Amino acid sequence: MNVSLAFNNNMNNGKVSNTTVDVVLVGAGIMSATLGVMLKQLQPDITIEIFERLDTVAAESSDAMNNAGTGHSAFCELNYTPQRKDGSIEIVKAIKIAEQFEISKEFWSFLVEAGYIDSPQSFISKIPHMSFVWGEDNVDYLKKRRDALVQHHFFKGMEYSEDHAQIEKWAPLIMDGRDRGHKVSATYMDIGTDVNFGSLTRSLIAKLQQKPGVNVSLNHDVTDIKRNKDNTWQIKVSDRINGNRRKLNAKFVFVGAGGGALHLLQKSGIPESKGFGGFPVSGQWLVCNNPEIIKKHDAKVYGKASVGSPPMSVPHLDTRMIDGKRSLLFGPYAGFSTRFLKKGSLLDLFTSIKFNNILPLLAVGRDNMALTKYLISQVLQSPADRLKALQEYFPAAKGQDWTLDIAGQRVQIIKKDAKRTGVLEFGTEVVTSADGSISALLGASPGASTSVPIMVDLISRCFKDKAKTPEWQAIFQKMIPSYGQSLVNDETLATSTRERTSKVLGLV
């Protein structure tokens, strides 16, 4: 049975007071689920209210079809390894993301062993990760990238080839119908993974809401957040089914509401929220409907982004396991919508414009004309245009084997920049009040794949005194055995950690 079916519209079972709780989590996605489980492990008597505006868990940013990339470990994502002006490759970000993903796997292994997840196969699968390029300059870049990455132990075992026959063995579809005279190259990492964050989130929320002191309310919209005189927070909530309204107080609030986080952060009025804006980017997938084609491809094949395109739009021919069924997607095709959520309002962008962020918004518009032109071109694409883009990766593709589906909505961060008034960021950023009583997650990729280290850092910042106690430190180390150590600098620890998590998660 789909886990989400077990949730009622309002699971208020009397376990939590309607007046004051320790923690309110806004949004029932992977970030809130991860934070909720961690806090419940660290302090079993903590009281938590989770509010989700939709009628099911993980239906916005976290679900499989809405997530632009799964299992981000920097094995194949070329935008994490830019080429410097001197031709060398910058790999610092790739190393950081690879470490963050290994930490996430540690926590997920703990969850399996602790009974939060009944079967790791329900959310994680072994799927090779590949990068694939063509053309003299791109081939030269990919070889330099591979040579740079394999110097670090995270990327040992990365294979490289310019041989058409070898690449065909790795991924037959990308060579089917390709001119053998074309210069191409690919890298291959056998230990790549696919992660269904929707399935993972539903498992965690289902287990979490069984714990004493935890309440999950679906179809409930958080409409306002205001600070009380005692520095707690008053939360206003509206039931989207019957219109009933409710107020409660919380000692700590986390806003993990995807694109909806910016509006709530602005309503909180904290000084740290000033100057932040959002730039929405929508997306679409081509989804294969031919089982014979689907079973021929077993890899996540990432290419290079088009000039001016956002990193979340890096094209990939992507094998995914969704609810136990193999799927094949290509995209995402970017687009523009003024909505901040897939099921949001067309007024979202306009209502987010404030006096304190209008200059950063204007500056970003001035400095990102290439992005604007790219999004316009994507919106105007015809079915023939989309098929042509697919055929760059799968030359023999036929239109009748693919259907168009809507991907998720992403809101990229716009914030003040001392030099240019405003800058567009494509990562994730946690905005926290000075006293640590409220925190919000803004941004997109790599997001879900790095949710665990993001939440560990958030707890360390927002629960400073408790996080430093021997009791909490011991629990952190139980949840994440490498906690307090560096997987980047300690190859022996990194190797043993990867071996252990691979075994627990069924990836060997």
Image: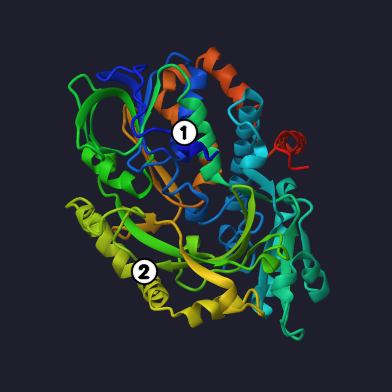
At 67% from the left and 77% from the top, the residue drawn is 134
Residue 215 in view in this figure:
yes
> Is 221 placed above or below 118 here?
below
- Location of residue 271 (image quadrant): top left
Which residue type does callout 1 highlight?
Ala
Quadrant where the image shows the N terminus: top right
Which residue in the structure is indicated by mark 2? 368
- Location of residue 419 (image quadrant): bottom left
Residue 456 in view in this figure:
no
Q: For this rendering, which residue is in front, 90 or 208? A: 208
Which residue type does callout 2 highlight?
Asn
Query: Of the residues under marks 2 and 1, which one precedes in the sequence?
Result: 1
Foreground: disc 2 or disc 1: 1
Secondary structure beneath dot 2 equals loop
Give me the disc on residue 6: 1
Residue found at the very far front of the displayed protein: 1
Decide if residue 411 is on the left or right side of residue 321: left
> Is 278 placed above or below 196 here?
below
Q: Alpha-carbon neighbours of circle 1 within 10 Å: few (<14), some, or many (≥20)?
A: few
